[in-house]
Image (tube, rainbow, N blue to C red):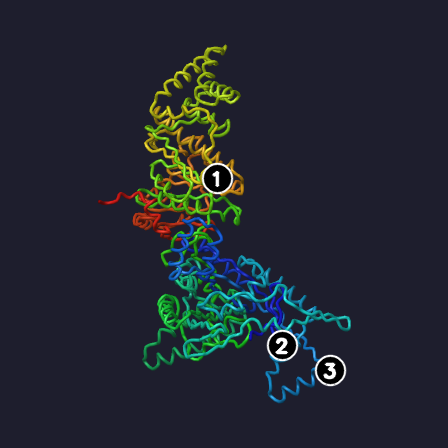
């Protein structure tokens, strides 16, 4: 039985009269972060410890979903056949790669004060009679139903909690734990290696209010503290077996740390991450309990002097006997000297007991995990698995009960614990969604492209960059297909004609072909609004941005939209009318030139695509509309817009018109509908003002319009701002950088990801090795990881792959 009497807000009252406050602490992105960010993470903890005194516990726990829970949550999203096949293959993967994430708690003891025991005339004789006869554990039996908590005690605990919150706030980002959080923590250690414990406590907890003599007490009911741990614990020499009433067994083993890397250079504290380096690299959950005691400098200095004298005496004894001084003793003396210097500067001393726990559902799995953990932790720690101490080490994950010996404490300056990066994480992705792939350490990564807008109050835009063979277009089609399986509406601009196989998927697919040899015709005046029509006409007929010609074009567009027929023939007539009626010679000349260009354009193999009849037809009666613009003569990136050929202008205008068409039709749908705008080779739109405005609009309105823009290009530099241009890279929720070949592209990718102080030569080589969906990814919360994208179900490969098949 856990000795819990009552839980109020984030405060626990145990049966011995002690109260504790529980805070839930956010993890900090650490993997692949810039050096100054890593230093900030370390310094925040280090400086926070310097301002504290007293003791507290840090619990770094793993929360792992079961396969059943994951599949049940996935099943609620959609019944689409593609999604159902996705679930089946995810189920197969989950046998080997169950996802888990860290839950960090800080628990602090509050004002130490005994709670009141209410002995009444009706119970005291019976209670002492049974106690004397040895029929029960006096303390525990009596406390089951007879303890009461004075109201002033609750208020004192509340005030002490607020004080601790203020003390800890500079060190960590945190919030008060909820009843659900606390119950999970109390039950979790009994379920290591098994499915997560289910909550059983009612919220709020049942309690009786007792008023007597002008005072008020709370009397918690008996069931509150009996419901938490109805299990049988068996201690073996090197592990525990916890048997649950349902027949499940949790096998657990524990390790204590007897040495950690120290001293830590204050100016270069990275590379010594003795907690983060272990917890964030195992493919299975590992829990850690750290009992921290912060000792004032003057007290610590006195104790350290005694230790120093002992060490010096031992050192002289080894030297006098002409024997080699043990390396451990020399290291201890070096550590003592370093600590003494820091204590003289009034820096407090931290004493820490660190216990790791590994759990599994069977002995074989526990042995395998234990061996792997020891190999990984051995590079940072000297670990001890003390036979016969398993129960005591299990208890280290609670602040109450039998404490571990103080001889297990490791003295250290605050920077050593800060450099351990206890709150750092290398996790990536969303809590749920569809299977995106795995980190290189084997941990699964999930993606829900809707989450940034719905939960994080940011845009949902996704950036993809990668050259040929990187898997860029493959990934784009995967993301679009998964969102289609969630009943989203998707418009996909395909410059390579690789999306036609998607028509074979079980969706309502409509393909538009804007290619030079197709029969497709459209009216640019039905693409969007009046500004869109002006932008297309400007792109077609005013490449130099002439003001007089712009006036002519704007007048003609307004006349077309005021009439009944909105198409290029109506535009031609409007321009002819300006030529025939304008009193200004310069204006008539500009109108004549535009009209002549319109006339010639109708016969052009690409220009003729703009001469579609005005039908007013809508295209979004379909799940997926893919616009194929293969074969267009898109301008080279190095050629300025003013020097584009006529064919290149027409091609760019078609791409712009098609993207505009997709955006306008998507935004016309109800806001409740998830909308996806996919643009491959998006760099072309960024080459001219109108295209950049369109991208900006899609990005800025994505959250409010429930729109997910997915922009893909071969080069990372295509996303960087040019001179006098706003940097839009911060508006992307996901940034996926795949295979890149040149140093310039890699430098741009690192800049976009926020990895500005990384070794460029190392990453140039690394990016050259990426292939087929492997690369660096930054998620909506700023975390970065090396990811291998994996498409599930694998049958989708035949619809996505553009790799030529061998005969």
Which disc is residue 121 wearing?
3
Comparing labels 1 and 2, the label whose residue is closer to the camera: 2
**Closer to us: 439 or 22:** 439
Q: Which residue is mark 1?
A: 699
Residue at 34 percent of width and 22 percent of height: 604
Callout 2 crowding tier (Cα within 10 Å): few <14, some 14–19, many ≥20: some
Sequence-wise, which precedes: disc 2 or disc 3?
A: 3
- Tell me the element at label 3: loop
Tell me where residue 249 appears, x and y as whole percent.
45, 73
Residue at 36 percent of width and 56 percent of height: 440
Tell me where residue 235 appears, x and y as whole percent.
45, 79
Callout 1 crowding tier (Cα within 10 Å): few <14, some 14–19, many ≥20: many
Above or below, 256 against 466 in this view is: below
Residue 297 appears in the picture as rendered: no
> Residue furthest toward the right?
213
Sequence-wise, which precedes: disc 3 or disc 1?
A: 3
Tell me where residue 323 appears, x and y as whole percent.
32, 79
**Closer to us: 655 or 626:** 626
Q: Are marks 3 and 1 in contact (CB under 8 Å)?
A: no
Residue at 32 percent of width and 42 percent of height: 467
Q: CA distance from mark 1 to mark 2?
A: 59 Å
- Tell me the element at label 1: helix
Tell me where residue 573 appears, x and y as whole percent.
45, 16
């Amino acid at each position: 039985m856990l000795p819990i009497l009552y839980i109020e807000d984030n405060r626990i009252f145990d049966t011995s009269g002690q109260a504790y406050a529980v805070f839930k602490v956010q993890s900090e992105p650490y993997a692949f972060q810039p050096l100054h960010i890593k230093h900030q993470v370390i310094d925040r903890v280090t400086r926070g410890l310097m301002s504290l005194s007293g003791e507290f516990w840090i619990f770094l726990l793993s929360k792992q979903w079961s396969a059943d829970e994951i599949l049940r949550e996935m099943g609620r999203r959609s019944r689409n056949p593609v999604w159902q096949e996705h679930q089946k293959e995810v189920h197969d993967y989950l046998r080997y790669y169950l996802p888990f994430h860290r839950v960090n708690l800080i628990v602090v003891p509050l004002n130490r004060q005994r709670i009141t025991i209410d002995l009444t005339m009706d119970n005291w004789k019976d209670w002492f009679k049974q106690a004397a006869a040895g029929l029960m554990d006096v303390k525990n039996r009596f406390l089951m139903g007879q303890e009461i908590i004075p109201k002033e005690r609750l208020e004192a605990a509340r005030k002490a909690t607020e004080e601790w919150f203020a003390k800890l706030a500079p060190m960590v980002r945190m919030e008060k734990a909820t009843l659900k959080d606390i119950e999970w923590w109390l039950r979790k250690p009994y379920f290591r290696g098994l499915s997560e414990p289910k909550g059983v406590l009612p919220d709020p907890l049942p309690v009786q209010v007792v008023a007597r003599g002008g005072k008020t007490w709370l009397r918690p009911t008996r069931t509150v503290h009996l419901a938490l741990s109805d299990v049988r614990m068996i201690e073996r020499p090197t592990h525990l077996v916890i048997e649950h009433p349902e027949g499940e067994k949790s096998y657990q083993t524990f390790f204590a740390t007897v040495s950690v890397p120290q001293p830590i250079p204050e100016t270069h504290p990275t590379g010594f991450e003795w907690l983060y380096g272990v917890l964030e690299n195992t493919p299975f959950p590992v829990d850690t309990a750290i009992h921290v005691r912060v000792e004032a400098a003057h007290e610590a200095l006195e104790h350290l002097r005694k230790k120093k004298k002992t060490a010096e005496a031992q050192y002289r004894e080894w030297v006098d006997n002409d024997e080699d001084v043990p390396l451990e003793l020399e290291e201890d003396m070096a550590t003592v000297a370093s600590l003494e210097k820091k204590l003289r500067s009034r820096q407090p001393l931290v004493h820490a007991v660190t216990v790791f726990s590994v759990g599994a559902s069977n002995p074989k799995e526990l042995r395998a995990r234990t061996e792997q953990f020891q190999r990984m932790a051995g590079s940072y720690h000297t670990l001890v698995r003390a036979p016969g101490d398993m129960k005591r080490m299990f208890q280290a994950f609670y602040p109450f009960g039998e404490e571990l010996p103080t001889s297990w404490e490791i003295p250290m300056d605050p920077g050593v614990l800060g450099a351990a990066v206890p709150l750092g994480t290398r996790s990536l992705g969303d809590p749920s969604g569809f299977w995106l792939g795995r980190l290189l350490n084997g941990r699964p990564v999930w993606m829900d492209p809707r989450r940034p807008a719905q939960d994080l109050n940011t845009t949902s835009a996704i950036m993809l960059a990668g050259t040929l063979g990187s898997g860029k277009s493959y990934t784009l089609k995967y993301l679009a297909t998964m969102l289609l399986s969630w009943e989203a509406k998707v418009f996909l601009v395909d410059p390579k004609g690789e999306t036609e196989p998607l028509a074979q998927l079980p969706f309502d697919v409509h393909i538009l072909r804007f290619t030079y040899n197709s029969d497709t015709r459209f009216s640019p005046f039905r693409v969007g609004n009046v500004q869109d029509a002006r932008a297309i006409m400007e792109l077609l007929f005013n490449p130099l941005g002439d003001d007089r010609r712009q006036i002519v074009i704007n007048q003609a567009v307004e006349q077309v939209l005021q009439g009944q027929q909105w198409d290029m023939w109506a535009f031609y007539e409007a321009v002819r009318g300006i030529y025939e009626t304008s009193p200004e010679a310069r204006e008539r000349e500009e109108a004549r030139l535009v009209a002549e260009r319109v006339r010639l354009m109708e016969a052009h193999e690409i220009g003729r695509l703009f001469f579609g009849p005005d039908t007013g037809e809508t295209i979004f009666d379909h799940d997926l509309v893919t616009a194929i613009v293969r074969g267009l003569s898109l301008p080279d990136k190095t050629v300025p817009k003013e020097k584009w050929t006529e064919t290149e202008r027409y091609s760019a205008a078609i791409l712009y018109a098609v993207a505009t068409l997709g955006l306008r039709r998507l935004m016309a749908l109800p806001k409740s509908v998830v909308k996806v705008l996919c643009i491959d080779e998006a760099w072309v739109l960024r080459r001219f003002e109108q295209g950049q405005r369109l991208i900006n609009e899609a990005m800025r309105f994505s959250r409010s319009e429930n729109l997910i823009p997915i922009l893909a290009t071969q080069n990372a530099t295509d996303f960087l701002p040019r001179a006098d241009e706003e940097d839009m890279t911060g508006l992307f929720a996901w940034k996926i950088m795949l295979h890149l070949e040149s140093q310039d592209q890699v430098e741009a990718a690192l800049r976009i990801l926020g990895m500005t102080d990384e070794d460029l030569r190392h990453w140039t080589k690394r990016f050259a090795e990426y292939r087929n969906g492997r690369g660096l990814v930054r998620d909506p919360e700023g975390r970065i990881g090396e990811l291998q994208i994996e498409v599930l179900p694998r049958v989708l490969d035949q619809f996505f792959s553009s790799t030529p098949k061998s005969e």
